[in-house]
Image (cartoon, rainbow, N blue to C red):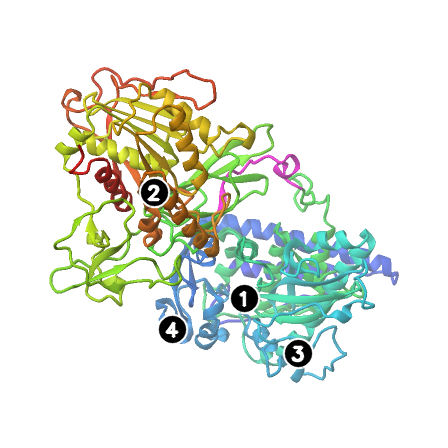
Amino acid sequence: MRCVLLLRRRSGPPLLLLALLLALCVYLMVGDEPVRSDVCYKVSSLQMLTRRFVCTLEALQRHAQLQLSSQRPPHRRRAVVLTGRHPASDTEVQLYQRVLQQMDYEVHLSRYAETSSFLRSTQGIGGWSLLLCLSTSEQSCLRRISFSHLQRHQTVNLLPGLVEAFSNVGGGLCRFYTHSQLTESSLPMNPHACGSTNQKLQIPLDSFPDSQAPPPALVAMVNVYVLVTSVSPLTSFLHDISVVMTIQHPRGQPVKLRDFLLQHLDPAASHQALRQVKQVISKVLQAAAASTNKKLRTISRCVLCFQLLTFTLLFSSSVTPVVVQVDTQLNVSGLSNDAFDQQITKDLILEDTLHFLLPPLSHLSSHTHLSSEREGSQYGGCTGTLGISLSEDEFLLLLHFQLLMKTSSAFQPLYPSVSSSSSLPRSLSDLPDLLTQIEGFYKLKTNRSCRTDEPPRQQPALSSSQDEGLCVDPHLRQIYTDPPLILTPPFHPLVKEYRTEVTFDTMTVRIRPEPVSSACRIHLDEHRGPRMANYPVGLGNSKISILVMDGSHPEPVIMSIYTVHVYRESRPSLPMFGYHVMCSFVQDCSLLVQPGRPCGLQPHSGSQSQRNACSSGHVSGRWVVPCLSCSDNRTCDWREVSWQPDGCYHPIVDHPLLQDCMKDRKLLFIGDSTNRGMMYFLMERVNSTLEDWGKAHDTLVYRNLNRGRTLVSYSYYPQFWLEKKQRPTFRQALQQLLNRSQPLVNSNQTVLVVGGVQWLNTNHLRTVSEVLDSESLSNILVVVKSLGMGFHLPVDGIRSLSLTEIQDLYRENDDIVTTAKHHGYEVIDTFSITMGRYKEFLQGRCACHFHEVEKFWSTKPSSDRTSTANTNRTERTVHTLGSQSTLPDTEQDAGSQPPTYRVRGPVNQVYSEILLSRLCPSTRN
């Protein structure tokens, strides 16, 4: 027995690689021992020799890792990610950055190979270890990168030979069919399966045995995802996630392939079907690889390059599928993206691929780094009497394959595989046989270990979190949004707070956070909030809270909270310094509430001179704004926009007159939060400050407004959060408000402001008249706040109005105005005012709030300020019928400076000022 180690070198070989090659020779020598002709003995002997060889490799790798760690710190690897047309906010780009940085890569982003500083050197070879070409930069990589000159430690996510083999030569015909003697029946594949990825595949009707209802047989279109790590010899892996499209679910669902087969077949048939899937794909890959081998024999190749492929399989009432499409990219278009299923599935497979192929530096660099230390060295091989000769490239590929087989992953071996081979090798005559034996060794290695100092190796089992449903890793994998948001800082599972900005035209953001562990539950904003939601984004600042919860307890427990602060920009504005024209608008062209009227900016010719004060609060009008051109709303100075009623004006009530007007008056407000916003604006205008504020959904009474000369009370209606049978009726709520505000005088010294965003109708106005008559208050001043814009966005959890329903709402608003006038009530037509500026809503899910309250900390002594509350106390009555108990707010500590508040919102300001002008006309007696 002899083992010849052939060396051809210009300088000495690395000692570690030499030792590994010697170990291989020892293995081959042992493999030449006499054996009986008994086949079982040969197989057993072969398994024993495989075990010895693999254990030798593992021992030497551990030694190499120790040697490297003792010599010097490992070099930090560089990764170049070519994004192409993918924006930086794309979750795929963010995923590569995050995962690679966690692996201690130095990540460099560039759009194309031609623009990357690391790839500008001759033939694209530079100081990088990993090159990832996203789909829109793939052609740039193939043009620029010379794969025959790559160094052995460099990895690219492309296998040019495979890309060429599955390219379309016309009509979807796969190129490898033209380079071989294959016929249409040679493979379980449609020869025209290499067409455009945009074509929509459908399950053909002839997949069913007859024209009647589908039988309980397996009929489906399935996308499976294959990772090829070498073409010659062929090595490939199959991801456990697939996308399944059936007649019942044509849009596709992500599901584990094994689980899908078990759902439709008995265990034996499902096992056979999975085996057939592997064999069908393996046959196609072998045929494609065979067509590229001739080229690969003449040039060096990228040993560590890889390619992700998508195989679309058609099951037609048989456990043996047919390949109907092959895509050289990761294709998840069969999934619906309404719930981000496409992005989530794609990112999951890509992340699994990175973790699978890119182990820690200490593992793989033990042979790849040392083998490239001495450039120019060439090694022959190790030849034993069994006839095996391994080049350095082949030996590196073998080590890489062995390392992948040791790695726990969602990928399972596809080819070579002992289970898919038609017959087991009885000897080791070439590298593919050796790879097959290594695959079989790790597959069958259940209770054995190469090391005596480690416990027996168990098959991968479900973690305790999966067994018990515990959320042991309460972190997010990613935050998916539509439109894609650029988070600051960039998303990382350990970072809990982010900020982002959106443009004025972005009114909603769809968000779906994805947890690291499926055992964790995600809820937005509250314990029982949705997992995914469409959020309205008001002008200015909004906040989205993401709760990661453990649902294994009787009462779900919050494990961690992520917060996203969203700032929505104001309408783009151009300050006016000179020439401008006046433009006006009634409605936005993106929401035609009145189809018969003009939309958008129109030239405005109205004059403000010689106009009288308006005689009512519902005079029709329009918004007026100075612009450079009425054809472009970006040239307008939106800081100067104003509401202009037709033919008259609403006077602004000066502060002294307002305080005098409000003397000895009682103002009662009943309605929702939009009505409450008008109330707080009035209180701030009367007092110059607002010291008490809250999002009250009950009854409030302020008895010390205007130095104790004015009372303001408020009752929230309707109480939509209660069961319908438990909600107070409008009559009951109004009656309770009147009782809480006694004593009342039957004159315009008592004011009732009633209204809200969209609940008010003409029946409520009749109820107001009846209740006031019964209480002998028919002469008080009643002001009706009409309907307003809101609920026009598709927001989860609340009703959303269609355009037709909004147009119907406009007609209903006209009926309310007419009925209010019939009863002699004042009307503030807030619908016409909000209609043209419906995009300028502020915080709130209804998109109906045109006001918000800001908090300020005063520096004045408390004695210098006018209080809105009686001795810093506001009475709150829980709005339950029959309850008269009052709960005082917590009093401020002695000597502390309580905050003050300010109501802001230009649209709310307009109709609130109209309210004041109707309460305090200059001619009032």
Which residue sits at x=41%, y=71%? 113
Front one among 18 and 135: 135
Residue at screen point 44% across, 51% down: 793
User: Would you name the residue on which mark 3 appears?
Assistant: 192
Residue 6 at least partly seen: no
Cβ atoms under marks 3 and 2 closer than 8 Å: no
In the rendered view, does 229 fall on the left or right side of 495? right
Residue 920, given in percent of the width and then of the height, sits at 20, 35
Which residue position holds label 4?
114
Q: Which of pointers 4 and 2 indicates the residue nearer the eye?
A: 2
Q: Amino acid at mark 2?
A: Lys
Q: Are marks 2 and 1 in contact (CB under 8 Å)?
A: no
| Mark sitting earlier along the chain (4/1) | 4
Q: Which of disc 3 and disc 1 is earlier in sequence? A: 3
Rendered location of residue 875, percent (x, y): 34, 20
Q: Earlier in the sequence, mark 3 or mark 2?
A: 3
| Distance from Cα at disc 2 to Cα at disc 1 | 79 Å
Question: For mark 1, what is the residue?
Answer: 305
Report helix, strand or loop for mark 4.
helix
Residues under labels 1 and 3: Cα distance? 27 Å
Kind of residue at disc 4: Glu
Q: Give the SS element for disc 3.
A: loop
| Region of the chain picked out in magenta, as a range | 462-477
